[in-house]
Amino acid sequence: MKRYLIIFALIFINLCFAKEITIDEGLQLLYKNNIQLKTIESKLLQAKYKKFEAFSSWLPKLQVQAQFTQLSEPQVKLPPTMAGLFGSAFPPTLTSDKLYSANFSVSQLLFSSGKVFSAYKIASLNYESTKYEYEKTKQDLEIQYKETFLKVLLSKKILEVSKKAVDISSENYKVSQQLYQEGRVSYLDFSSSKINYFNSEINLLKVKNAYEIAKESLKNLLCVDFEVEPTGELEEIYKQQDFDLQQLKNNIPKIYEVKILDTQRKVLLNNLHITRTEVLPMVSVAGNYSWTIDDYNKPIEKWDDRYSWVVVLSWPVFSGGATTSRYLQNKETLRQVELSKESLISALELQLNSLYSTYLQLKESLDLAKQNLSLAEENYKVAKSYYLEGRSSYLELLQAELNFSNTKINYYQTLCDYIITCEKLKKYSH
């Protein structure tokens, strides 16, 4: 008994401090707090910076350098008798053991046989692929969130039905006890009502536990540090949806998973081009201007200044077959991606057919579940009046009660499954 009291106390405390959220409010919390979404956002920024890095290969490179050099002895060592006669003929940088220098250099790639353009194209495609990955992750999380939220509402409905079932079984137990004392029902009916009442209490505890677990799953998905209490009704969220299977199949190439493989294929095509350019020439130009002096306090006019520039032609002639090997490897990787795309499209078509078949079944089942619910409620009312009048046994009342409760649960389960299936089908409708 103490154990049950503790459970009820914990549930009561959670309800008191829980934050009520609608399905739209929870979606905003998901966008704001979900760790998986934050991780992919970071990857998206990283891919953007890599794109800027690839673009920088087209820009000139500038470098400024300052240097102090201490020599063991001057490069030109003049005897004291000759220093006065010929010292002015040598620059101070040759006759001093201390040198101060400043250097400015610039380099620019002039021609790369398309290698730099392909590298930039690859970085741009990787950024595009990461955007698709971000949208896919966001879409998957939205579906997972809505499914979890709806299952919490379903658990809440089942909890309400279970509580009502306890109330009904409790009322029936009291009535049976009274009728048994009056001698109007048998001991079998009385004991059956008592057993049913205890079983409904046990079932209520199980349902409450399942409801708390469902809410905890939602809390973990939202990555929040407070308790959440989803609000709303399944009937309010429900909307009649119509889907065309052929149109959904036509949208498969637009799904993010397929788009990611398409961009990977383009990346590999550019990799093939880069591999081919490894045997083509590259041309670059570099310039350098330097100042050197033995005493940095001397005026700038006294500094020894020099400049140089150079044009470099680089042309790999033979790589021992390594370039050809890399080219063939990239071709095979490209073939694997193309085969993966075919396999993915087949898997998506199979998944779509399964979802659509489930959608049609649930659509029809939902209409039947509504009719069954009305019939079960009517049957329960009739069975209860017959039992009170002594025209039927408690077992017949119990059967009607169980049918009513199970039909309610089945209706809400079907409604929840229908909404979730429609959300999953929306993935193919964009």
Image (cartoon, rainbow, N blue to C red):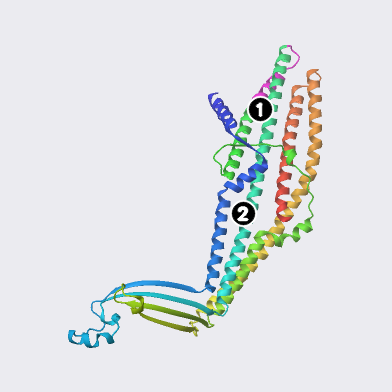
Q: Is residue 195 magenta?
A: yes
Neighbour tally class for label 2: few under 14, some 14-19, many 20 plus, Cα within 10 Å: some
Q: CA distance from mark 1 to mark 2?
A: 42 Å
Neighbour tally class for label 1: few under 14, some 14-19, many 20 plus, Cα within 10 Å: many
First of labels 1, 2 by sequence position: 2
Viewer-proximal residue among 217 and 210: 217
Q: Which residue is mark 2?
A: 137
Viewer-proximal residue among 329 and 197: 329
Image quadrant of residue 203? top right
Magenta region's main secondary structure? Answer: helix
Q: Which residue is mark 1?
A: 200
Q: Is residue 239 above or below residue 315?
A: above
Image quadrant of residue 64? bottom left
SS assignment at label 2: helix
Q: Position of residue 289 (x, y in %)?
A: 41, 79
User: Is the C-beta separation of discs 1 and 2 under 8 Å?
Assistant: no
Q: Specify the segment rendered in magenta.
A: 182-200
Q: Which mark is residue 232?
A: none
Q: Position of residue 162 (x, y in %)?
A: 68, 30
Q: Position of residue 347 (x, y in %)?
A: 68, 59
The residue drawn where x is 60% and y is 60% is: 130
Give the residue type that dot 2 points to.
Thr
